[in-house]
Amino acid sequence: MLLNRKTLSASLLSVLAVLFVALVLLGNTLLGGVRLDLTENSLYTLSQGTRNLIGKLDEPIHLSLYFSDKATAESNRSDVRSLRLYRDRVQELLQEIKSLGGDKIRLHLIDPQPYSEAEDRAAASGIQGIPVGAAGEKLFFGLVGSNATDGQAVIPFFDQSKEAFLEYDLAKLIHDLVTVKKPVIGLVSGLPLAGGMDPQAGQMTQPWAVYQQLSQLFDVKMLEPNGLNNLDDNIKVLALVHPKKMSEDSQYIIDQFLMAGGHVLVFVDPNAELDMGGTDPNNPMAALTADKSSDLPSLFKAWGITYSPAQAVLDKTHALTVNAPNGRPMRHPAILRFGREDVDQGDVITANVDTLHVASAGVFQLSKDSPYQLAPLVRTSNQAMLTEAGRLRFLGDPATLLTDYKASGERYAVAARLHGKFKTAFPSRNDKGHLAEAKQAGDILLVADTDILSDRLWVQVQNFFGQQILNTFADNGDFFINAIDNLSGSSDLLAIRGRGTSSRPFTKVLALKQSADDSFRRKEQELQQQLSETEQKLVALQSAKTKDDKFVLSPEQQKELEGFLNRKLQIRKDLRDVRHQLDADIDALGAWLKFINIGLMPLLMTLATLGFMAWQAKRKPV
């Protein structure tokens, strides 16, 4: 009888095992193309912008992922193990892109082993090798994309800290492969970005460093501020730097460019310190009294933006140290340094910006009736205040700006992204081809400072044997190029925002540990307090004793000491109980997770498969 029961149990287990395998195989067959992304931020679901980019491919592109798999397989270094996990994340997202693109996406996984042709190709393509061994071994982890016309785009190394922008970087690489020509940038500037004549020195000046970088990466067309007329249809981005007293007709051209789907980047300033428009060699005082502010009143009003060219922002918290007139260093509340905590780490433009410098900047605010969304990219501290911009034009000692300083308690936006489906700022115009509303939602980038682009705030330019060497000390140039690069992409690329990361902390476990630590600290503090009280009592009892019995514990001291030791033992026990309870809570949580992952989820999937099969059977005609 016992043998029959054992045989029956073994047979039942065998049948269940066969049934489970059959259901898994059947599920793979019937649901092979079905994907269900249950991650918090839909990490494995491509955004609509990426889907649109891939859907527009008209020729195959090759994506070659280089990763030093064999060289890192047995490494015990935590950073290498972490990169191997991130490799899986990158590869899974590439597989999702390949699945969506079909035969238009050719994915190649390459392990560039030391001294191999694959390693040489990786290095020649621009993949960055990171030393990981004493013998000079290098770790490669990058992506090379190529198209049918030998065009190439490269991600030299996948930085794990940029995981939130992984989909954006991959989509941009694909976008660059299908965009053969350099994007055309229309630049309107009231400042000598491209160089020009210095009226004070009487000689030509070199182009600013940001203009040199812009010219290398884009096709730049310089435009006259009040002679825009009809803009070239090839212009992707219109960058306005210090637009002073721009005519209504020119603002209308900008308005219609935006309505037609163009992208606009605006730099205005309440006090552009490098504005030499009012300089007169015969009248040195003219530069001091000249208006150095810029504004786009008609456009800003239509965009629901509140900006005053008569107000500048001061911030004691972010004041940069400069040399005062007496030669001593002091902090200047109008020249500000912003760090990572002051910029939007969730926006691709500012995600990798560590340091930004601005001078005599203004601020942007959204008007109450604005239908658009204003997302600050760079913000002051809550210790900032607004002041009259005129104070900065005649400033001698920066310390005077601190006189009667009163922080507003508000964080002001110095740079921001404005999003929405924009309507024309000139509804009464009836020009031929007039557009009353944008074809689709878009973005405008706004920066309330032009000095941010000047060399003095971010770079030292040195001449080295006829070559200009740029030594940067801030990320102002990267901020500018990132903004142009972001806006020059397609609308699909602009729609892709930063995502969450695949590394998710065990918040419940962390909360349990935090609670246990709080209890532990309270018990320790209680023990320390009782120890101090006991010592004080012992000292008080000791001081009352004579010289003859000072080395002998009195009955009172003995009782007090014994009482403390007993309380100490109890508190020690309580501390151990706190730790034991923490371990028990974590073990219980782990047991529930194991049950859900190992038992409940397979059961639910099996029931779902059976339900799907039953539904399919009912649909078949008899």
Image: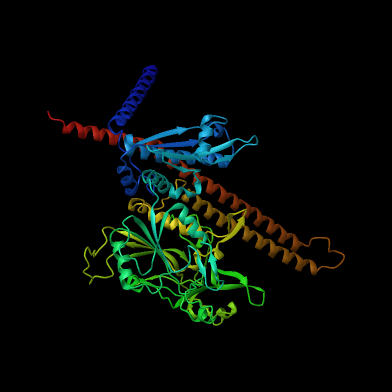
Q: Is 605 drawn above or below residue 196 in the view shown?
A: above
**Viewed as shown, does residue 132 lie left or right of 611?**
right
Q: How many marks?
A: 0
Which quarter of the picture shows residue 530?
bottom right
Q: Residue at x 45, y 70 (%)?
A: 412
Q: What quarter of the picture does the N terminus occupy?
A: top left
Q: Residue furthest right?
A: 548
Query: In front: 350, or 63?
Result: 63
Q: Position of residue 294 (x, y in %)?
A: 42, 73
**Seen in the image, is 431 located left or right of residue 52?**
left
Rendered view: 485 above or below 102? below
Nearer to us in this view, 439 or 570: 439
Q: Tell me which residue sits at (54%, 53%) in the image.
A: 516
Percent coordinates x, y for residue 355 in the rendering: 54, 60
Say which quadrant the C terminus sits in: top left
Q: Is residue 532 left or right of residue 241?
A: right
Residue 342 lies, with reference to residue 48, above or below; the image says below
